[in-house]
Image (tube, rainbow, N blue to C red):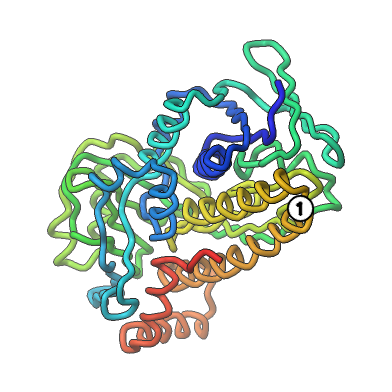
């Protein structure tokens, strides 16, 4: 098979970049090793920055989002029984976020691509990337057969554990990483949300988050030690522990229901740089991972897709190597600022098992400062709604 850009991975980064390239008349093939049903059902993030929503509208893939997405004008931080609203109209006028699940974003983008008749090869595993310095070729396995995709550029959008980054020589990539000593146990249930906005709660027992996917579907999380197993957390234990970590007024509004999905996600901060080697560009989790406390993973992938597509269009149309050179530096500027915010929010809201007494007092002081300072809340708000695309 022959194309301009071979995209490995059918997550948000791959699908958005493919749609942007298609809009510019650039040919793409997406290869995805998972089955179609799996990709359309996996549960992920649910808070979209304005720039992400605007990108989806620009692509003509936001009609359902505009009908069903929940526009939020703020969210709540809870420190014990103290609640602090991060009110966007007061802190960042004219800006907001939209609650709309990543599952739904992926469904919309897959439908958008399939309606255009463009190639999206599910159950096709990329096993090697060859000749990155010249005309690349992606070697795939599909239904027991070898599929070769020749192209001019490769977009690696296949996640933290995928092929793209691992295919590069170790000396070509510098990585920075923090593995946090806890994960998030999440439960998705068809029950009304406990609050009309997201609630991020810090307590002596650990962190909790009240989120939602719609007015009738809620997503709840609690912090658990690294290495915990789902079988150690029957649903009745989860609901009881969630209530213990929330302010009493919000806890009283939690409605229980059978779990549609349960999972435990480890938390890490990770960056690989540069994000471009020769004719391979890394996007999304293949290049960086943020803890979910700042609601940034999907949005950062969407920004990568915007920058990568812009660079690829200039290169493919005019042979502009400088555009490819600029991709990594441009994307990494946003990546590191976003990593800082997600790291800061994680430190602010979670219980760490190894804090010294001094560090514990500093965490308390930071929480008090956020509760009292308009300036501190403004910093949180402007990062939460999202930095503008360059």
Residue lying farthest top? 144
Viewport quadrant of the C terminus: bottom right
Q: Position of residue 101 (x, y in %)?
A: 35, 45
Q: Position of residue 64 (x, y in %)?
A: 29, 40
Q: Is residue 286 visible from the viewing direction of this image?
A: yes
| Residue highlighted by disc 1 | 320
Depth check, front residue: 293 or 257: 293
Residue at 69% over, 19% down? 141
Q: In which quarter of the view is residue 175 placed?
A: bottom right
Residue at 43% over, 61% down? 293
Q: Secondary structure at mark 1?
A: loop
Depth check, front residue: 255 or 321: 321
Q: Is residue 182 visible from the viewing direction of this image?
A: no
Q: In which quarter of the view is residue 157 placed?
A: top right
Q: Position of residue 5 (x, y in %)?
A: 67, 36
Residue at 73% over, 15% down? 146
């Amino acid at each position: 098979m022959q194309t301009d850009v071979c995209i490995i991975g059918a997550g948000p980064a791959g699908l958005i970049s493919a749609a942007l390239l298609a809009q510019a008349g650039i040919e793409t093939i997406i290869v995805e090793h998972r089955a179609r049903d799996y990709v359309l059902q996996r549960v992920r993030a649910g808070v979209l920055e304005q720039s992400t929503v605007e990108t989806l509208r620009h692509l003509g893939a936001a009609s359902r989002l505009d009908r069903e997405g929940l526009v939020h004008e703020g969210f709540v931080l809870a420190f014990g029984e103290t609640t602090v609203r991060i009110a966007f109209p007061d802190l960042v006028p004219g800006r907001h976020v939209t609650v709309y699940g990543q599952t739904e974003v992926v469904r919309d983008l897959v439908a958008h691509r399939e309606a255009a008749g463009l190639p999206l090869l599910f159950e096709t595993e990329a096993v090697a990337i060859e000749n990155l310095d010249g005309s690349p070729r992606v070697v795939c396995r599909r239904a027991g057969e070898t599929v070769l995709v020749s192209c001019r550029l490769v977009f690696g959008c296949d996640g933290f554990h995928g092929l793209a980054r691992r295919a590069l020589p170790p000396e070509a990539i510098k990585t920075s990483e923090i593995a946090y000593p806890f994960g998030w146990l999440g439960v998705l249930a068809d029950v009304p949300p406990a609050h009309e906005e997201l609630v991020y709660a810090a307590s002596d027992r650990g962190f909790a988050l009240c989120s939602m996917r719609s007015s009738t579907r809620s997503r709840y999380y609690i912090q658990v030690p690294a290495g915990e197993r789902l079988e150690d957390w029957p649903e009745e234990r989860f609901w009881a522990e969630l209530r213990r970590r929330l302010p009493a007024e919000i806890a009283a509004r939690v409605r229980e229901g059978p779990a549609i999905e349960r999972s435990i996600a480890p938390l890490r901060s990770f960056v690989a740089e540069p994000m471009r080697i020769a004719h391979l560009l890394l996007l999304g989790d293949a290049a960086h991972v943020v803890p979910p406390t700042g609601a940034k993973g999907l949005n950062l992938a969407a920004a990568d897709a915007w920058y990568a597509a812009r660079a690829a269009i200039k290169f493919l149309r005019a042979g502009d190597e400088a555009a490819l050179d600029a991709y990594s530096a441009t994307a990494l500027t946003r990546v590191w600022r976003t990593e800082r915010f997600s790291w800061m929010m994680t430190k602010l809201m979670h219980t760490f098992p190894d804090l010294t007494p001094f560090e514990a007092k500093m965490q308390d002081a930071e929480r008090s400062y956020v509760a009292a300072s308009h300036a501190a809340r403004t910093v949180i708000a402007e990062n939460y709604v999202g930095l503008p695309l360059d």
